Image (cartoon, rainbow, N blue to C red):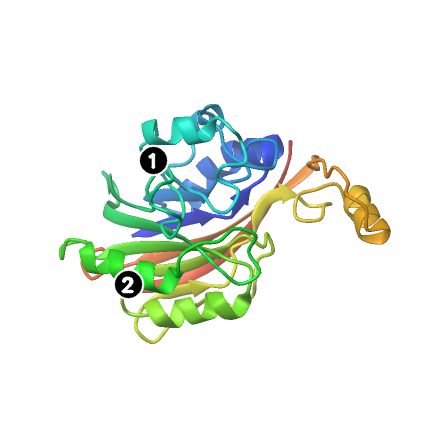
Amino acid sequence: MNLLFIGDIVGHGGRSAVQQLVPELRKEYNISMVIANAENVAGGSGLTGGCLKELRKAVDFFTAGDHVWDQKDFEKEINGIHDIVRPANLSNSQPGVGIKIVRNPAAGEIAVMALQGKVFMRDSAYCPFETAERLLSELPDHIKTILVDFHAEATSEKIAMGYFLDGKVTAVIGTHTHVQTNDAKILTGGTAYLTDVGMVGAEYSVLGRKVEDVVNKFRSGMPRRLPVAEGLIRLDGCVISYDRLSGRAENIQPISRTVEV
């Protein structure tokens, strides 16, 4: 089975690129299921139910990270949205859930878990390692395919999580930094790993934001609005091939495609 995981979708341009490119990628790689990190879909920061609705023709399931509550109304919407998880190691008093079992006609049953890192992250969260261990122990034994979106800043924390979960999950895919890393591999226990899958955002940008504004902020040290960049959009993702019966990953292939929107 082949699963496509897409990096952080940034703003309107990112949404448009996903809608244009994903149908082609489904055919090219014989994709059974598409999962995307959507925490930046609404104006580059946060999510809305409307933005997710716009993406559903292309994407089967969504994950989120530390920007999950940036759009003020989403905390009221999330409990009515059944195809998304937010970081599982946030406070239990927050709405939404951090793991779901997805029943996909083509891919079978897949558990999707989101976790948020602690190192260099702006918001406090519980230990992602303890949270992952607890949630895995609560899954039914027949669930073999498990994908973890680890939304974290520090590469060391992400790599450690990959080894911690090796042999226990199908894939550990890093998000948050918006820069695709060159370390896709199958770990010794059969888990696919990638430190960061990248983003769906403007090719000429700084993490999806307009270059000139970001440079000015760094040079001046002053707070500045950082508008989302448009134009040529790059879609970063990875294709994970796995055995449906065992849940073991067999291959992981990073991809990047561009489209003018």
Given the image, on which type of amino acid does mark 2 rest?
Glu
Q: Is residue 79 left or right of residue 68?
A: left
Does the residue at mark 1 contact the one at mark 2 (Cβ under 8 Å)? no
Q: Which residue is mark 1?
A: 83
The disc, 1 or 2, on the residue closer to the chain's N-terminal end is 1
Q: Is 168 rendered above or below residue 48?
A: below
Report x, y in % for residue 205.
72, 45
Give the residue furthest to the top: 50
Residue at 26 percent across and 45 percent down: it is 107
Asked whether the viewer can see residue 213, the reply is yes
Report x, y in % for residue 9.
54, 40
Viewer-side residue, 169 vs 68: 68
Q: Is residue 157 left or right of residue 177?
A: left
Q: Is residue 124 left or right of residue 210?
A: left
Residue at 72 percent across and 39 percent down: it is 226
Q: Is residue 253 left or right of residue 167?
A: right
Viewer-side residue, 94 vs 260: 94
Report x, y in % for residue 233.
64, 40
Question: Distance of mark 1 from mark 2, alpha carbons?
Answer: 23 Å
Residue at 20 percent across and 62 percent down: it is 246
- State the quadrant of the C terminus: top right
Q: Which residue is mark 2?
A: 133
